[in-house]
Amino acid sequence: MRRKEGQVLKYILIVSILLFAVTCSGGEKNAVSDEPGIIKFVSVPVDRLPVVHFGMVIKSGSASDPQGKEGLAWFTANLLKRGSKSYNREQIEKGLEEIGGQLDVRVEREAIVITGKTLRENLDKYYAIFSDIILNPKFPSDEVAGLRTDQEQAIKNIIRNDARLCHEAFLRELYDGHHYSHPAQGNLGSAAKLTANDAERFYRKHFVKGNVICGLAGMYSPEFEKKFQDDMNKLKRGMVQDRTEMVAQPAELRVVLVEKPGRDQSQIRIGKMIDYTRRDSLWYTYLAANTYLGQHRESFGRLYTAIRSERGLSYGAYSYHEHFRQSGWSKNPMPLTPFNPQYFSIWTYPKRINTEFAIKMAVHELHKILTGGIEPNQLQKFVSFQVNHFPFLIETAEQQLLMQMEEIYYGQPDFIENFEKKLQSVSHANISDILNQSWSSDALLIVVVTDSAGAMKEELLTQETSLELPSGATEAGLEDVNNRVKNIDLGLEAKDIRIIDAEKLFN
Amino acid sequence: MKRAALFLQIIILLPAVLTAQISLDIEKTVLDNGLTILTYEDHSFPTVSYQTFVNAGSRDELRPGATGIAHVFEHMMFRGTPSHPDYDDAVAHMGPQTNAYTGQDYTCYYVNARAEFLPEIIAIEADRIRNLDFTNETFRRELGPVKEERRRFVDDDPDGFLEEQIYRLAYTRHTYEHPVIGWQNDLEKNMTFRDAADFREVYYSPNFVTIVIGGSFDTENVLNLIQQHYGDWPSHLPPIGRIRKEPPQSKERTLDLTWKSPEIPAKAAVAYHIPDLNYMDNDILALQILQRMLFSESGKVRKKLKDELGLVESIRADAEGMKDPGLFLIRMNLTNPENIDSALTVLYSQIDSIKVNGVSKEDLVRAVNSMKAEYLYRLDRPARIVGTIGYYHLVGGDHKLMFEYYEQLGGVTVKDLQDAAKEYLKESNRNVVVLKPADAA
């Protein structure tokens, strides 16, 4: 009893101190070695809660799946949680639940991201499980059948969800022939054949020191940090060669219609591959321009204004200057979702009858920014938006940890520190020239998940663009623009439009 | 202006495991016009979260034909005022996180921003709730995106459709029967501009509004600003009409439906009526613990149905505390449409075994620990802290329930779980909707 009282007092003290000690400036950063072949560590040793966060990035994702074994990175990462040297699956699940610990694995094209958290007082129990999973995975063969079932369902869930299906179909088409063309979960045929031995081989090749970034955030001692580093350094030495594979892009606009019967609404993705990266100063110009064109889930963007606010055609219309995944229920981008080469995209989802109009409206708005640029005051407003929005990307210890790991991943140790300065230096002077380098509206790829794809193909070829406003709403003040948009000639020929069956997409 | 300073402290005592302690200093102020303000000042953040809670949601939609009006009006609140004709344009330079959501019990508008912008946010938020400028034309136009939202999340989404149907089946008199987004027919044909104006007239009034602020600010200064911007906002008359109580259910209700296309798995939703959010007794907490214990990653029902028998692809459950009696709602995706009867039989037998055999103390501790830890993890930023304060204030009637939740979770016993299972998770209190894919019908 006395011991418990002592523990309570200890935590009161720690929490009280930290409540006033922590700032949200991205945390104090340790120097990170850039020596190849060693693990890079990140430490964010502050927080206001008695919580410890773990992060681990393996710089290999589904793009590293061998041919014919698509889905192997996903299979391997998920098999880790199903058994290690000292714990079987049930012990892992119950052990974590008993202490309120969390452990998540996600697989991206270029990374496996493992994150976890525990209450400080359960750190030792949590770490015993976490470290055993990472360092001593067992790849139990008796878990393979169950995991295969889960993987098959994960692939089917993409097909069942129109928005996810549209996006994966878009990526499949855009990266045709590239390692990004299959979803991280793989294809139904390949995933069904994966084995525990495959997973073990993938682990041995990719979970090596030169391919790993590790980190801690929150309330932990220097001694624990050292133990964590020492333990993770027990991973095998080795490196995985970085590679960038370029993909040949068709020079003409093209459309892929994914047939899905029974839909009242269409899902649309429009975009193209781009050649800028975060390391380029132009990246900030594209970020600012994208904020103006279609900032995610914000209603001030041009696409949102034209498609939703003024015409009521869709619940949303947004653009993305690089690959984007939303972080949970927030509007924030999820850190550590690397793509190389990257792509630009526009998303919207109108009623079936307004699909062609919405496509043309989006192209129209893109064309406007490419030809007319952005007014200086508008540009400044959206630069201010991003500058003032940035604290929400590093608001918590967990976010700081992931963002600092992302800095290492991209080789930009000063990304957080210099974000505002670089963004403020964006100029409107030749912005349309710059945007035309990567966003030019020719050679776009358009993917639509839709009902009656055959009829839509005909509509696209005959240029008979319908527009149905919400009942009771009028075209007042919009007639001229609407007519101009309807009359946009996308220049499509029959050979430019393909119809594919959703059910056969990821076989 | 009445102010009550409360120093609230909770001790998280997880049996045999957790001892961490958190303190939150929350101050409650009520202006003369009835506007309530809850402040949580915390200078460890560089940001603030400013959330305006309107004590009305789809539960308060009483006029037939106007279902969804609370949500439609939430959309209208972004349409601007004479001073700020474009709301999002007016706040864009601050780089805020802004949005809103409508639930069954309340509606929330939030703005999260750097702390230095708080005075500007107070002015803009007061302006839009008091001086919103909307016309029949903008109302009609906004119905378009709402209908597309419904198409996306209900009409083309079998999960959204299933949820809508289970509420429709489970409630016969109470307004929880209709969906937050409203029936499509009401959105298409019945809802009028007058409905929106009336809804605003009744509920967008200081006596129905609570502002919750968290983060880095000076409470005294902020309360002065709020008094300045909201102090002369007149209260409106309370609503006419009342929400009808749902009578006790005496017999199981079932509904079989077919989805419009074949690609989905067969689905089932099972719902039991449960008490409202009230910690005077342990029933709601016991049911929430049962939900975690049975349906979490290592939950007994999940293990049985998914891993052992392979009858379901996935299964999950919720037992959210509501203003009025809510639902213990279980949703499952079947591996095969032919498995529906077997899966439901196993589910019911698992629940029945708790009534007969109880649960182990170990399982109870594990569930409570994970719930408490999860709660603690959520308190990591102003927006989530403020959202939690607002939820308990609006739904439970007192924000201090957010602390009682912790304190009382640890006091729930194995017998409480067994009693709650017997009382609520029984056949006569059960509603079941089955949704089959087109070609399995």
Image (cartoon, coloured by chain):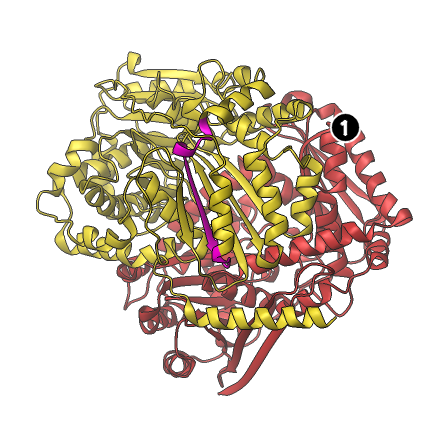
Chain colours: A yellow, B red
Q: Which SS class for mark 1?
A: loop
Residue kind at label 1, given as amino acid type: Leu
Q: Give residue A191's position: percent from left, percent from top.
A: 55, 19
Question: Is B103 situated left or right of B368 in this image?
Answer: left
For the magenta stretch, what is the residue range?
A206-222
Q: Report whether residue B399 is seen.
A: no
Q: Quadrant of residue B99?
A: bottom left
Queried whether the magenta region covers residue B45, the answer comes back as: no
Q: Quadrant of the C terminus of chain B?
A: top right
Characterize the local packing of mark 1: few (<14), some (14-19) or many (20 or more) Cα atoms within 10 angstroms: few
Q: Give residue A156's position: percent from left, percent from top.
A: 56, 25
Q: Chain of mark 1?
A: B
Q: Residue at x 39, y 62 (%)?
A: B112
Q: Residue at x 41, y 78 (%)?
A: B230
Q: Quadrant of residue A272?
A: top left
Q: Give residue A86's position: percent from left, percent from top.
A: 67, 36
Q: Report whether residue B258 is seen.
A: yes
Question: Is A436 situated left or right of A186 in this image?
Answer: left
Queried whether the magenta region covers residue A220, the answer comes back as: yes
Query: Compared to B279, does A51 lie above or below?
Result: above
> Observer-nearest residue: A209 or B99?
A209
> Observer-nearest residue: B23 or B291?
B23
Query: Compared to A1, does A46 lie above or below?
Result: above
Q: Circle 1 is placed at which residue position?
A: B309
